[in-house]
Image (cartoon, rainbow, N blue to C red):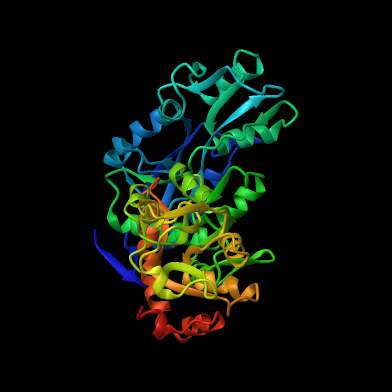
Amino acid sequence: MKVIVLLALPVLIFPVVLRTTFQSAPPKYMVENGKPAGIGYEIFLYLRNSLKKHGIDLVWDGKFRNMTEVQNLLSSCRIDFFVGMSKTKDRVKRFDFSKYPLYSLSYTMLLRKGVKRPKRVAVVGGTKTERIFSRYFQKGEFEVIHTRSVNYAVDFLNSGRADAIFYNSMSLGYIYNQNPSRYSMSNYLSGRYYQFVAFSKCVSSDVKVAFNTAIFEMLRSGVIKAGILSLNLWDYMKPGNYLVLASSDWPPYEFTAGDKWVGVDAETVQRIFRRMGFEIYIEKMNWMRILESLKLGVIDGTFSIPMADDWKEYLYFSSEPIDVGIDGFLYRKDKFKESDLYVPANLVCGYVPGYAYEDILESETSLQLVPVSNEEVGVRALIFGRLDVFATNEFVGMYYARKLGESSLLGFFPVFGSNYYYLALSRTDGYHEFILRKFSKELEKFKKTSSYKALLKKYGLNYEELWTM
């Protein structure tokens, strides 16, 4: 087919008609007042209007089907695309997917009101949900009731034949909102996953490029976010350009000031994601909880993290470092000279558990290790004489020394060498790898600007000194 390219987008000379079907799955697709409705339907309408100018006409076949039927139609090219499908290994082989996801959600449980510890859990049989359930829970932990659909599962719950339903958070959140006096939501949440537009293998690459552009504009303009908020589902799902990161106070790299995250790395990350058209939320956690949440996929990522081999098992890293620093010992100059620390012996050494240099410290038998909750606690303990040395980053340690008015008392001795710090996202979804590639390109460009040097200066750092460590 011949195409004319304008502004890098295909405009097809002859109209292309693409067919889809809807799924029986409120609130993604549903019927209200005899008409189609739901967030999937609203996305379909937006795409239909947006793609018309590229000569692409989207048509609904007028039917609501289950997911097995949707996949069969898509794989046989009897429909061309479907709005709202998650990826699996099998589906990636059978279908193509949009570059950008539409939204993210989790798996959770809806309980009958008053049930504290469910014994009988309804699960839709023969689905991805059933496989996920068996992955997260041990065999025999619950009596599993297999149902044909989530509607049947709700009937089991309402009649008392089940205590809970295990399903995606979008659907269960919607059911809960319809009748909060009858149900309660479990605190359990699985790792987040995404739903995309899925394409049959018969759809051309030009058409998929046009879809990707339209989806990104839909995300950037807040259309999907508005749809989620209108259904009161923000606690249960997020737009595809929304990321949840986590960090802890680690000045001058990142720390909280009121309700805002500030610092060189925090402000760099926020600025780059805004340029990319992403919205991020940074949750405050201690370091060990951050690592555990990343393993489970409960959060999307963190930043100012070195590229340690152990973490590569469950994290993707940006190719471009955000920052750099030197790790070593903070010490009291009135008690030690630097020469005393070349071969440290019988020293009480404080450290924050979970950092990359923990294994090195544990291998040093001459040190008496004392874990502390965070850097400020460690620096205070050092000042008051409860520690001989405190293992930390030089900039972080000296920041707290200045904050506590004791910068002249403390010195820093480099032990572990310099470290580059990166943005890292969990390996729970390959989409995160795509995000990191875009982020690295934008970061590389930003670091060459005067705005970046001004940001460093704001926190007492010098570009040349920093990047020649």
Residue 324 in sight: no
Q: Residue at x 62, y 45 (%)?
A: 235
Quarter of the figure with the N terminus: bottom left
Q: Residue at x 59, y 59 (%)?
A: 386
Q: Residue at x 63, y 36 (%)?
A: 174
Q: Residue at x 43, y 63 (%)?
A: 53
Front-lying residue, 229 or 119: 119
Q: Is residue 445 above or below residue 80?
A: below
The picture places residue 80, in percent across and down from the top left corner, at 35, 43
Image position, residue 179 (x, y; %): 72, 30
User: Where residue 94 sits in the image (x, y, percent)?
Assistant: 28, 38
In this rendered view, identify the residue nearer to me: 450 or 405: 405
Q: How many marks?
A: 0
Q: Is residue 431 above or below residue 61?
A: below
Say above or below: 435 vs 444.
above
* x then y, percent, for residue 181: 75, 29
In the displayed structure image, the side of residue 65 where residue 73 appears, left or right = left
Which quadrant would residue 469 be assigned to in this image? bottom left
Looking at this view, name the residue that lies furthest to the right.
181
Apparent side of residue 405 relative to residue 320 in the rendered image (left or right)? right
Is 347 displayed left or right of 226 in the figure?
left
For the residue pair 424 and 273, the one nearer the viewer reads as: 424
Image height of 78 relative to 347, above or below: above
Q: Is residue 355 visible?
A: yes
